[in-house]
Amino acid sequence: MTRKDLPKLTAEEAVQAIQHQNTVAFSGFTPAGTPKAVPRALAARAVAEHSAGREFKINVITGASTGPSVDGALAKAHAIGFRTPYQSDPDLRKSINEGETRFFDMHLSRLPQDVRYGFLGPVQCAIIEACDVTSYGEIVLTSSVGAAPTFCNKAEKIIVELNRYHPQFLRGAHDIYEPFDPPLRSDIPVFEPSDRIGKPTITVDPSKILGVVENNQPDETGGFRDLDETTMRIGQHVADFLAAEIRRGLIPPSFLPIQSGVGETANAVLMAMGQHKDIPPFQMWTEVIQDAVIALMQQEKVTFASGCSLTVPPTTLQGIYKDWEFYRTRLTLRPQEITNNPEIVRRLGVISVNTAIEVDLSGNVNSTHILGRNIMNGIGGSADFARNAFLSMFICPSTTKGGKISTIVPLVSHLDSSEHSVSVIVTDQGVADLRGKSPCERARTMIRNCAHPDYRAQLEDYLAMSGRTHTPQSLTAAFAMHAKFAADGDMRGVQWRQR
């Protein structure tokens, strides 16, 4: 590959190469590994263009969510026309739900492939955060991988944001592998979470690199709230259930790799598993490596973690960097196309634990929408894992909004993971093992084990009203609890009408 001296640019100079209606792909997976200086300059340029009476919006593709410097800054600047595949920024969420920004929610494992196939159109520019870049076109990523390899390969030009906050010794932390596309695709040879199958860097033709923008800022990741009684009870229920499955011989005594969603409840689940005397040390095959994983790694309860990002607060990340000799043999960062790959999830026998917004009596899961209308974040990778897991678990509190919303409802207001992909539901009230149960049996188990006591009688009345049928649902009453909350702010006290 021809060597090319890479020009240094300011962020303001770099964004002049991006035009109205361009599709721009950003590295990162969560705020980890997401550029900061260049997107903020892009937002400032959008504000200036709008002030001058000119249109300026770009289409934004990322690995998953980003930090405030991307989704937040661009949304405030009214600079996003189209967005996919996942987001979690309040300003962008508002723009999407008000119809200003077009958003397409999709499975994270599919995003890189769809970009390569051209389903999302051409990518004019990729903005990639790196801890090192060479004149031969080698790009060393920082605290995540996401879909950066595909973005670099498909983009017409690349802007590298060289972030000095992340040390160059991260070379080797990443396992960069892109599968061939059909009809040339072969198996992906991962048989253990610690297997390495790719290269330590992304390598591109250096002529594609428009320039390098230097920066020195930590990831815009924050810590999670302290565990409360509800999250700790959910965590304990999960740990107790998995330990019981080991005793029953339904999970191998050596245990299986764990996938865990992100957030306070996921932290509670992992910590409870790590503290349970009947759960042996385990490995992670997951998307997000967060605080609890690092804490359990220090205690040697997590022996290896393969993920897509290190989504931890800056203080935790600095601790990892200071003790890199310990961590470098215990974790690997990969593209989301590999971490979330159905083939590998099924082969490894991953136990998946993901969060739900609401679950219905059949076990259908809504993980994306509030009252069926407004999107919260997106489906992320939950269904990538749930559909293919050895054991698929979804967790949520039994109520929210001070008890005014039941998360266990007759019928979900939006469907993300169907009952056919869901094995176990866990709330602070208990565990509903739905395997091998008919719809009526599922419904009774959900009410008895997972619904809050304030709602059990109400849900039992719904079940009785639905009559003798294979699936106990009433088309005229299924959303009465949602409608009551929309009307007066409380799901309690629904008076069921006959179907």
Image: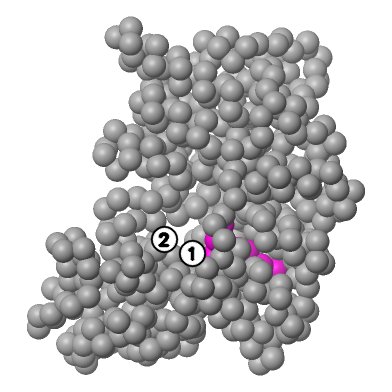
Residue 467 locus on image (x, y percent):
19, 90
- Of all residues, the one furthest to the right in this rendering is 325
Q: Report the span colored magenta.
A: 257-266
Amino acid on which disc 2 is placed? Ser
Question: Would residue 17 be visible to someone looking at this image?
Answer: no
* Residue, disc 1: 355
In the image, residue 493 above or below residue 228: below
- Front-lying residue, 281 or 82: 281
Q: Secondary structure at mark 2?
A: loop
Q: Pointer 1: residues within 10 angstroms few (<14), some, or many (20+)?
A: many
Does residue 25 appear to the left or right of 152 in the view shown?
A: left
In the image, residue 396 above or below residue 315: below
Residue at (53% x, 24% y) in the render: 39
Residue 329 locus on image (x, y percent):
86, 53
Does residue 476 appear to the left or right of 200 in the view shown?
A: left
| Quadrant of the frame with the N terminus | top right
Q: Pointer 2: residues within 10 angstroms few (<14), some, or many (20+)?
A: many
Q: Which quadrant of the figure has residue 498?
A: bottom left
Question: Would residue 297 be visible to someone looking at this image?
Answer: yes
Residue at (59% x, 50% y) in the render: 223
Residue at (23% x, 83% y) in the render: 458
Amino acid on which disc 1 is placed? Thr
Q: Are marks 2 and 1 in contact (CB under 8 Å)?
A: yes
- Of all residues, the one furthest to the top in this rendering is 52
* Residue, disc 2: 367
Please say whether residue 261 is one of the residues in the magenta stretch: yes
Please say whether residue 189 is one of the residues in the magenta stretch: no
Residue at (45% x, 82% y) in the render: 429
